[in-house]
Image: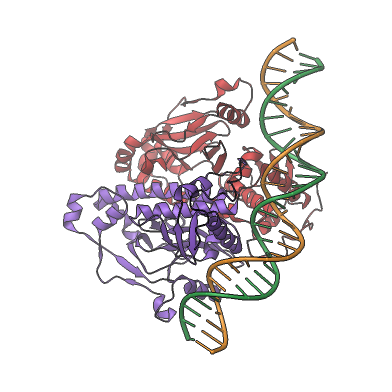
Chain colours: A purple, B red, C orange, D green
DNA sequence: CGATCGTTTGACGGTGCTCAATCACCGTGG
DNA sequence: CCACGGTGATTGAGCACCGTCAAACGATCG
């Protein structure tokens, strides 16, 4: 198990320092502000709060560090401010089932409220930062700042809708379709963060993607190659450039039972095999 | 599409009346009480509320009736009081992707809060009843009854944890393992409702189960036969008797990558092939 | 520069998807 | 009352897809 843990820590981010220095969760240099949190959650700006600048704990999480341990007591709720996290459950035989890749604005650790303990582990896939709110103070914050209370409820609602999307990703029949859905999903999230929806830097390993999609990691590799051969994208290790987003979305449509034309195999729509 | 809808209506419950009389959502004879709702959500009984008996809308939903339509505006939140519901998304080509089977105490329609419209359809699989709370009144109720507010938050938290469980079900490799996980999941939910965890009356069709598990419906049939041959259960159409719950749970353990002994095929643990 | 891990590609075998037929159940209409 | 059509459930045959095993390459770190 220790081996698995250090392995996970390794695979995330490893640059310029020994990993034991990197695997750390620490308070940020300057605290966050409540108004920032509300903006992150998609709430309309609240003038009173923006003016007051109420302080809120902000943590730095280095790539590879574990923010939440499966089984640990519920202590804090988190909202991702920047970076990427991997949420997963570890089964008895050591297999990591990835459940989600969380990005800015998403809630972490909320499932533990009703259970008392964390049902999932959460590790950072790159240097990240999160707002932290102790569960003991949750009630007080909700009462004191109704805008925060409302934003939290809406964020929870969106989070539940997200779970449905994740489910749809894994539901596809063909492996390439699953990967296509995953990439489109990632792309639209990048767009939501104001980033380019065409250039993706995958923060996670093939194995993690494979776990999320419910296929073998070799199959993920092969699916990348397939999508590239069909001209939908160009892939260089973890750098992915989406050449034909519309075509990729068309790929996404394939559903179980709708056999039809099997995703028009070998029919690149635009530039034919634009690889080099 | 009309054919699909009437088909769904048929499969749910068909007894003693023409189906067009049965497909209805209507107010119950007597309204529900807030204290009942809180108990349903698992909150500690609040003496003040139990005494007062604050009224709350209660709806009857006949088997086959659609409670929420995908794409409809967010109007009410619901909490299942009794019965079973199927939550699904319909893709353009008409394929129904089942996301969940909801039972007593579970929230319905909450995802629509943040989006403004329903991302899923919800139909009753048997005669059921739900508490209904207009979203316009949600804030007022939360402010007026802090116990309700708190219970809602905890219920949301549990609901999110449930999403993780659903994900795990579909993540299994072998089809029989998926079905085993589904049955164990159903069984534990029955136990939670005070029902027998060994005798299950499946409210949903094989096709619905197949959709949830991400396999073909023939495969579900075959998996049932397999699990029965191994002595784990006895199956008669939609009546399922779990003969060896412990063995079934052992089945559940198989994960992707943990090849091991492939679930000890053809090795019934207790009574050998108890089928007549 | 060697070690380790991640990624890619190949070969092969098995699981599950597709198509198809059969049976059982139910409600309808003769 | 029974024949009929419709739907769901079960089982079989055939084959494609994907999981497993294996090897090679590349990147990163010590």
In the image, residue A150 sits, relative to residue C19, either above or below, namely below
Q: Is residue C24 left or right of residue A52?
A: right
Q: Quadrant of the N terminus of chain B?
A: top right
In the image, residue A138 sits, relative to residue B127, either above or below, namely below
Where residue D1 sits, quadrant-wise, is top right
Number of numbered discs: 0
Q: How far from the left and from the top, in percent, is residue B82?
A: 53, 36
Q: Residue at x 42, y 60 (%)?
A: A200
Q: Nearest the camera: A149 or B241? A: A149
Q: How far from the left and from the top, in percent, is residue B219?
A: 70, 46
Where residue A201 sits, quadrant-wise, is bottom left
In the image, residue B181 sits, relative to residue A203, either above or below, namely above
Q: How far from the left and from the top, in percent, is residue B201?
A: 65, 39
Q: Nearest the camera: B41 or A126? A: A126
Q: Nearest the camera: B199 or B238? A: B238
Residue A116 visible, this orientation: no
Residue A44 visible, this orientation: yes
Q: Quadrant of the C terminus of chain B?
A: top right
Q: Is residue D17 left or right of residue A105?
A: right
Q: Nearest the camera: A230 or A210? A: A230
Q: Residue at x 43, y 32 (%)?
A: B32
Q: Is residue B268 left or right of residue B86?
A: right
Q: Residue at x 62, y 43 (%)?
A: B209
Q: Residue at x 26, y 72 (%)?
A: A29
Q: Is residue A201 left or right of residue A52?
A: right
Q: How far from the left and from the top, in percent, is residue B21?
A: 55, 20
């Amino acid at each position: 198990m220790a081996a698995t843990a250090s392995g996970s820590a390794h695979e995330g981010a490893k640059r310029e320092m020994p990993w034991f220095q990197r695997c750390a969760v620490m308070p940020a240099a300057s605290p966050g502000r409540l108004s920032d949190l509300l903006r992150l959650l998609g709430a309309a700006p609240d003038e009173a709060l923006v003016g007051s600048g109420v302080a809120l704990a902000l943590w730095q999480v280095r790539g590879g560090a574990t923010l939440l341990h499966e089984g640990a007591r519920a202590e804090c709720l988190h909202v991702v401010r920047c970076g990427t996290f991997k949420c997963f459950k570890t089964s008895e035989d050591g297999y990591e089932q990835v459940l989600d890749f969380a990005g800015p604005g998403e809630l972490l650790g909320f499932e533990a409220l009703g259970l008392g303990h964390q049902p999932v582990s959460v590790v950072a896939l790159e240097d990240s930062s999160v707002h932290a709110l102790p569960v003991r103070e949750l009630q007080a914050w909700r009462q004191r700042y109704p805008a925060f209370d409302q934003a939290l409820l809406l964020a929870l609602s969106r989070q539940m809708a997200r779970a449905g999307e994740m489910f749809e990703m894994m539901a596809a029949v063909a492996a390439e379709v699953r990967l296509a859905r995953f990439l489109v999903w990632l792309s639209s999230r990048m767009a939501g963060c104001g980033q380019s929806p065409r250039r993706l830097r995958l923060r996670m390993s093939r194995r993690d993607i494979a776990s999320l999609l419910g296929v073998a990691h070799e199959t993920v590799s092969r699916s990348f190659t397939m999508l590239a051969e069909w001209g939908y994208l160009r892939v260089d290790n973890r750098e992915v450039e989406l050449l034909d987003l519309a075509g990729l979305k068309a790929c996404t449509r394939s559903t179980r039972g709708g056999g039809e034309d099997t995703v028009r195999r070998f029919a690149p729509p635009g530039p034919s095999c634009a690889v080099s």
